[in-house]
Amino acid sequence: MFKWFLDMPIDQPALDATTFTKNRTRLGATRRRGRVLRRRRGPGEAAPIFDVWARAASYGSGVSDAAPNDSTHWRDVDESADPETFVDYLDRAAAVLQESRRETMRMLAVAPGCAILDVGCGAGEFLIELATSVTNVRCVGVDASRSMIETASARGATAGTSVTFAVGDAKRLDFPDASFDRVNCSRVLMHVEQPLIALQEMARVLAPDGRLVVFEPDFDALMIDSDDMLAGRAVRTCFTGRIENPDIGRRLRRLVVAAGLDVVDVTASVTAVPSLQVADGLFHLPEHLHHAVTEGALGADQAREWRSSLRTTDARGLFNVSVVGFRVLAMKRDPAPDATLERT
């Protein structure tokens, strides 16, 4: 991990962890009412957490050509046979990444009066939590998927927020220059062709002295603990081969600087996945194992033995799959005054 720190006072109080936790609990209570009824949820309701994990195994047990891990499908969610599959996937990831969102909010230092843009907002989790934790903020989320925007809008209304969600392209943001004090982008650039263009757009709409936080996993560093390292590497290779930018995490700092922003803080963190069931739901390990066999990277017997070993370690409470994530905090500095104006 490497860090750069600058002293950047904020005039107004920012979001604190206690307020964040209190409001997230309130949102969770809204969701729990949906669990008790045990009915099919509408577009504005988040997936109940116990249902999310219960479904994880079924998502990872078969072979599908429309796995949410595939960048081509993430770029065109609305054309998929079941867009709700992608919403469910984001809900599963949101349950794992609660601490990650808290850290992003801390780094953004959102204060009353701020205007915040979430690029690739998905189902709206980040902005809805933020809007219920900080008063007098303008929150706008954009996503390429109309299905995602409809879900986010319905959830925002259910939570009683005034967040605005709209369909938009990360590489052509439909906002004037310097429109936002804070910009967030999480787990989006790994699927974006030409991510530098998207970052340049975020820099354009960011106001002087504004903050940008970008968080991306580095799936090329996905760690799968097993005695057969070659099999684990083969599965990871099949996984990363279906992601546009599997190593985007380690490249974030260079890209943010190339977009014209000053990097203030770079952190790397490791998230451990708690079980094989959850790992299958998030990373579709059986699908990628199947592809490793069909593509000739593994033999069928070796694949079966590897999968069996994962089940054994999982049953003994020793399962370990971990993913590395990188988070970059950057600022847009005020341009230096024109020297000729200073002399006049």
Image (spheres, rainbow, N blue to C red):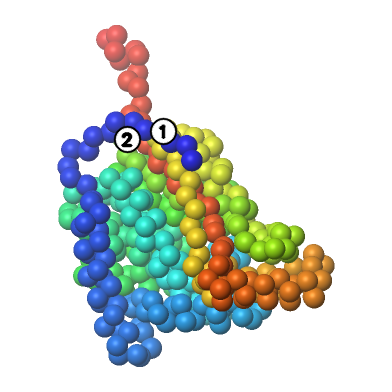
Q: 10 Å neighbourhood of mark 2: few (<14), some, or many (≥20)? A: some
Q: Is residue 175 visible?
A: no
Where is mark 2, residue-wise?
208
- Quick one: label 2 or label 1, which is nearer the N terminus? 1
Q: Along the line of sight, which residue is nearer the eye, 57 or 162?
A: 57
Q: Are marks 2 and 1 in contact (CB under 8 Å)?
A: no
**Amino acid type for the residue under numbered disc 1:** Trp
Camera-side mark, 2 or 1: 1
Where is residue 52 shown, x and y percent of the image? 44, 78
Q: Residue at x 45, y 40 (%)?
A: 266
**Front residue (pair 126, 36):** 36
Can you say whether 91 is above or below 175 in the image? below
Image coords of residue 321 (percent x, y)? 57, 62
Residue closer to the observer: 208 or 268: 268
**Please, what is the three-letter code of the amino acid marked with disc 2?**
Pro
Q: Quadrant of the C terminus?
A: top left
Instruction: State the residue position of label 1.
Output: 4
- Residue 113 location, x and y as percent? 19, 48
Separation of marks 2 and 1 at Cα, in angstroms: 20 Å
Instruction: State the SS at label 2.
Output: strand
Residue at image position (33%, 78%) is 45
Q: Report how many numbered discs are placed on residues in the image.
A: 2
Question: In which quarter of the view is residue 152 placed?
Answer: bottom left
The residue closer to the viewer here, 262 or 72, is: 262
Please name the residue shown 36% across and 76% down the image: 46
The answer to which quarter of the image holds residue 165 is bottom left
Q: Dot 1: few (<14), some (14–19), or many (≥20) neighbours within 10 Å?
A: few
Residue farthest toward the front in the current orientation of the protein: 316
Q: Is residue 32 visible?
A: yes
Helix, strand, or loop for circle 1? loop
Above-or-below relation of 230 to 150: above
